[in-house]
């Protein structure tokens, strides 16, 4: 397997009111194609910052981020914008959908913005509807954004993140606002997407969510304190429970 993401000596410093906050400190990380990696750790430890800098949404202070073999810390802004649009998918809670568009129009927006896509509007629409059907929300395609539930909106965000067939999805607490059932459904969808070959890096505070991943990173104070590899996932309820228990034990050892 090739590496999809290589992070080398990543540092990120924020300066607020002349105070320097070294949020990420020489962080190193490799993610292979097809991996599903959960990022956990205390509040303020730098999880979201890691996701934003790894995906080119935030500049780095020092270090390198190589995505799909290209150093995205050193490309021109418009080139980076194209890589992000065509090769990465994003599920961020704070990235709201556009209110004056329907759910479907929001889902297909990244495809109509892509310069690489040679599809007609009709083809893009059909693919958007297909994704919505797969995620069980096709019936709300023509609803306004404010006419859907939180779980439906989150699934619409997943559809939108997939519309340009990304190599990797970056998700910041994708189930954070959902109840247990919706969270489980969203995670099962993300697992399917991952099994079809898309790498996923997601930040979560939920052991159940992390237990569905193939690897868990524990971040403390801007660095990776520990990593936990999980066995191949099965649908067996007993095995899932065991997985959650062993992961939980490890997290407690990490200081969770
Ligand atoms: N845009 C910003 N400007 C200045 N400081 C920031 C910015 N974003 C984050 N920080 C600071 O960086 C540190 C890490 O924040 P980050 O959002 O990465 O934490 P987190 O691990 O995602 O926490 P949480 O679990 O609460 O979401 C915090 O001290 C935060 O105040
Ligand atoms: Mg965060």
Image (tube, rainbow, N blue to C red):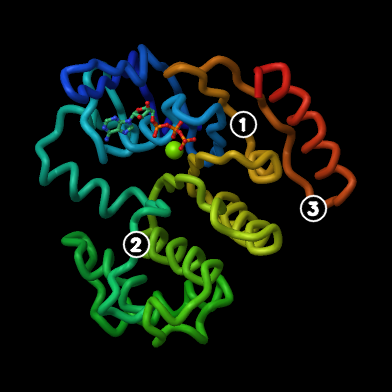
Q: Is residue 68 visible?
A: no
Real-space Cα separation, disc 2 to disc 3, in angstroms: 32 Å
Using residue 251 as the reference point, say whether residue 16 is left or right of it: left
Q: Are marks 2 and 3 in contact (CB under 8 Å)?
A: no
Q: Earlier in the sequence, mark 2 or mark 1?
A: 2
Q: Is residue 212 visible?
A: yes
Residue 136 at what x, y percent from top left? Answer: 58, 76
Q: Is residue 89 above or below residue 31?
A: below
Residue, disc 3? 235
Q: Residue visible at 70% across and 31% down? A: 230
Q: Residue visible at 52% across and 86% down? A: 139
Residue 56 at what x, y percent from top left? Answer: 26, 37
Residue 215, numbered label: 1
Q: Are marks 2 and 1 in contact (CB under 8 Å)?
A: no
Quadrant hosting residue 96: bottom left
Using residue 88 as the reference point, say whether residue 29 is left or right of it: right
Residue 180 at what x, y percent from top left? Answer: 69, 58
Q: Is residue 41 above or below residue 109?
A: above
Q: Is residue 51 above or below residue 160?
A: above
The one nearer the camera, 129 or 254, is 254
Residue 96, numbered label: 2
């Amino acid at each position: 397997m090739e590496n999809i993401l290589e992070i080398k000596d990543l540092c990120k410093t924020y300066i607020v009111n002349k105070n320097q906050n070294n949020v990420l400190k020489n962080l190193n990380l490799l993610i292979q194609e097809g991996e599903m990696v959960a990022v956990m750790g205390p509040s303020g430890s730098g999880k979201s910052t890691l996701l934003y800098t790894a995906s080119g949404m935030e500049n780095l202070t020092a270090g390198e981020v190589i995505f799909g073999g290209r150093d995205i810390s050193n490309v021109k802004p418009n080139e980076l914008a194209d890589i992000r649009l065509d090769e990465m998918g994003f599920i961020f809670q704070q990235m709201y959908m556009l209110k004056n568009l329907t759910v479907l129009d929001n889902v297909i927006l990244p495809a109509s913005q892509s310069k690489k896509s040679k599809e007609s509007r009709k083809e893009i629409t059909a693919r958007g509807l297909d994704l919505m059907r797969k995620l069980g929300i096709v019936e709300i395609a023509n609803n306004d954004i404010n006419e859907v539930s939180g779980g439906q909106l989150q699934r619409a965000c997943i559809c939108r993140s997939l519309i340009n067939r990304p190599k990797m999805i970056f998700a910041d607490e994708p189930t954070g606002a959902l109840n247990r059932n919706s969270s489980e459904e969203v995670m099962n969808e993300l697992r399917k997407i991952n099994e079809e070959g898309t790498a996923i890096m997601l930040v979560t505070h939920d052991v159940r969510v992390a237990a569905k991943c193939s690897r868990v990173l524990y971040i403390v104070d801007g660095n990776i304190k520990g990593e936990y590899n999980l066995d191949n996932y099965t649908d067996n309820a007993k095995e899932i429970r065991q997985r959650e228990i062993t992961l939980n034990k490890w997290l407690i050892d990490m200081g969770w």
